[in-house]
């Protein structure tokens, strides 16, 4: 499924145009009593575009995910966060793929919000509307949405359980979820789980202590994917030159140091997701 938002390019939609041209079974899935399940809408990939045919409007579509969905009387506000690595698309390319996307041609000329029971990324990539720079050594799980309550932790596994415990307490105190790669086992290769975790996360916490090469590599991937990365280290000497321009939260590896780190980390995450 994906959100198709036509015309509401300023981040505000009207409820009377919600779920137009949407299959009845999809409407049932997205309804919550007399209102809409904003949480489910927020988890869907999204295509936002203007009505077509107006020369005074920039005719491009954007692909991404929704955040900050809020109902205000008869209006619903939202923010679109572009999917990393996916450029804007000319609207004529979207129109050419109307059948693959489950869109009726007349929909391009009416401001509305529909939900289509179609694989958005599969249709766009399969139809040639999107080309993406892709790594050769692993696959990006572009079919997975970013989970706004998920914080990923990149750190050495051995000897860091107490540090991870403090990080987890900071994250969970904000009502968020915290995971590191050894918390999950979904793929045959651990790197696939690491990439999936980074991709799905809203924030990535990287502990650079010990100059761990894996953590450096994973931190670079998180930066490339546009994630908010919080750097930790027990010594600033462990921070490589290319990352020294980014603020690093230094902490002492003892009970008191963990508590102080937890407080500072909580404040920083709250600033990012608030």
Image (cartoon, helix red, strand yellow):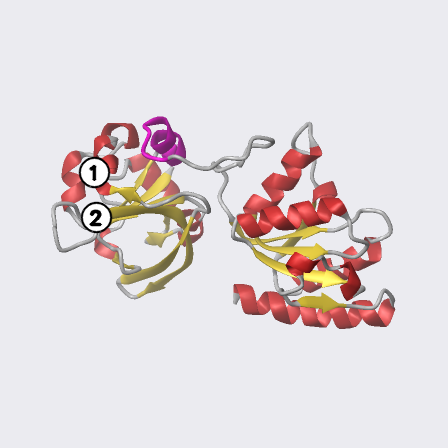
Q: Nearer the viewer, residue 236 or 9?
A: 236
Q: Tags 1 and 2 in contact by the CB under 8 Å rule?
A: yes
Q: Nearer the viewer, residue 43 or 108?
A: 108
10 Å neighbourhood of mark 2: few (<14), some, or many (≥20)?
some
- Looking at marks 1 and 2 on the same chain, the residue that comes earlier in the sequence is marked by 2
Q: Please say whether residue 86 is visible from this viewpoint.
A: yes
Q: Quadrant of the N terminus?
A: top left
Query: Where residue 129 sits in the image (x, y, percent)?
Result: 32, 34
Judged from the image, the secondary structure of the residue bearing numbered disc 2 is loop
Spatial separation of the CA atoms under disc 1 and disc 2: 8 Å
10 Å neighbourhood of mark 1: few (<14), some, or many (≥20)?
some
Judged from the image, the secondary structure of the residue bearing numbered disc 1 is helix
**Residue tagged 2:** 59
Query: Where residue 242 sits in the image (x, y, percent)?
Result: 65, 57
**Residue 61 in the image: above or below residue 125:** below
Q: Please say whether residue 172 is visible from this viewpoint.
A: no
Query: Where residue 262 sits in the image (x, y, percent)?
Result: 73, 68
* Residue drawn 58% across the image and 68% down it: 270
- Left or right for 198, reference 4: right
Range drawn in magenta: 118-130
How many dots with numbers?
2
Q: Nearer the viewer, residue 45 or 125?
A: 125
Q: Quadrant of residue 99?
A: top left
Seen as rendered, the residue at the extreme front is 241
**Residue tagged 1:** 92
Residue 106 counted in the magenta span? no
* Residue drawn 84% across the image and 72% down it: 256
- Left or right for 26, reference 92: right
Residue 120 counted in the magenta span? yes
Residue 264 tag number? none
Q: Quadrant of residue 8?
A: bottom left
């Amino acid at each position: 499924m994906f959100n198709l938002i036509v015309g509401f390019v300023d981040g505000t939609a009207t409820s009377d145009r919600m779920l137009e041209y949407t299959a009845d079974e999809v409407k049932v899935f997205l309804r919550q009593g007399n209102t809409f399940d904003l949480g489910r809408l927020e988890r869907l990939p999204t295509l936002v575009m203007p009505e077509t045919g107006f020369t005074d409007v920039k005719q491009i579509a954007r692909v991404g995910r929704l955040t900050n969905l809020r109902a205000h009387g008869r209006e619903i506000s939202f923010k679109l966060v572009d999917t990393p690595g996916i450029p804007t698309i000319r609207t004529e390319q979207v129109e050419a793929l109307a059948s693959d996307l489950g869109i009726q041609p007349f929909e391009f000329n009416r401001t509305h919000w529909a939900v289509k029971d179609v694989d958005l990324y599969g249709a766009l990539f399969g139809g040639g509307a999107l080309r993406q720079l892709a790594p050769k050594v692993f696959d990006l799980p572009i079919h997975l949405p970013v989970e706004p309550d998920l914080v990923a932790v990149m750190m050495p596994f051995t000897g860091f359980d107490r540090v991870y415990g403090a990080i987890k307490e900071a994250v969970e105190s904000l009502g968020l979820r915290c995971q590191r790669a050894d918390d999950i086992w979904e793929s045959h290769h651990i790197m696939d789980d690491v990439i999936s975790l980074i991709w799905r996360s809203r924030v990535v916490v990287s502990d650079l202590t010990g100059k761990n090469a894996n953590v450096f590599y994973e931190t670079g991937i998180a930066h490339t994917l546009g994630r908010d990365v919080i750097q930790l280290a027990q010594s600033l000497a462990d921070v490589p030159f290319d990352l020294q321009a980014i603020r690093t939260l230094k902490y002492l590896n003892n009970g008191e140091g963990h508590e102080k780190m937890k407080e500072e980390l909580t404040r920083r995450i709250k600033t990012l997701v608030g």
